[in-house]
Amino acid sequence: MNLIRLSVVGVGVAFLVAGCGGRRSNAKVDFSQMGPSINSKRYANLEKIAAKDLKCDQELTPQYLGENQYQMIGCNVEGVYELKCKVGQCSWIPDVRARAEFDMGCSRFDLKTSKLDPVTTGVAGCGKRAAYRLSTLGRGYSWILNSPVALDEVPAVAPAPAPAPAPADEVPVPTEL
């Protein structure tokens, strides 16, 4: 009798470990195509962060961008997140555009980013630009404005050359006064 009870408990534990009753989208994600550091627990955490960040309660579509960076798409918006791991502890780095949106007064979807160095990212859009530095806060990460928000310089418009005189078809005839 104890053997039967033990086997029933074992089957129950196996279902829990296998993720029975988890989020429905995890079943649709092929983790073999999602980079070396992702697993179902980390993906569920990413989904939760992205849904809140993007203000989207619909199912999100992931896309692996390489180098532990993931693009999450849903509700006609997208965000880019990076998984950073140190000694087996992993945290998600939020999309820098969420912070830049506030500082620059510009929609995050009009902002473009460029990596300046491993911990600094440049953000430009709406005629402005700024640099952000990645900061460690306890176990998580945050972007901190690392430069003043500057207006992009608009190149001076060169004055148009004076129009060339129109060719004369007739030779002017001098008149006497």
Image (cartoon, grey):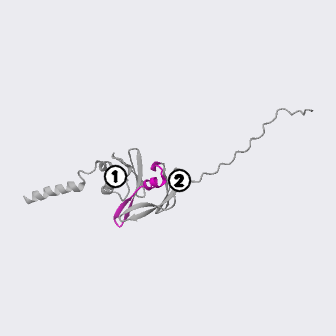
Quarter holding residue 46: bottom left
Quadrant showing the N terminus:
bottom left
Foreground pick, 48 / 12: 48
- The verdict on residue 89 being magenta is yes
Quadrant showing the C terminus:
top right
**Horizontal arrangement in the rendering, residue 124 relative to residue 40 (left or right):** right
Residue closest to the far bottom: 87
Instruction: Choose mark 1 or mark 2, whichever is in front.
Output: 2
- Please provide percent x and percent y for residue 149: 51, 57
The answer for how far apart the CA atoms under marks 1 and 2 are is 30 Å
**Range covered by the magenta-colored residues:** 83-109
- Checking the image for residue 47, the label placed there is 1
Foreground pick, 175 / 31: 175
**Horizontal arrangement in the rendering, residue 10 relative to residue 161 (left or right):** left
Residue pointed to by mark 2: 128
Q: Characterize the local packing of mark 2: few (<14), some (14-19) or many (20 or more) Cα atoms within 10 angstroms.
A: some
Q: Amino acid at mark 1?
A: Glu
- Checking the image for residue 85, the label placed there is none
Q: Amino acid at mark 2?
A: Lys
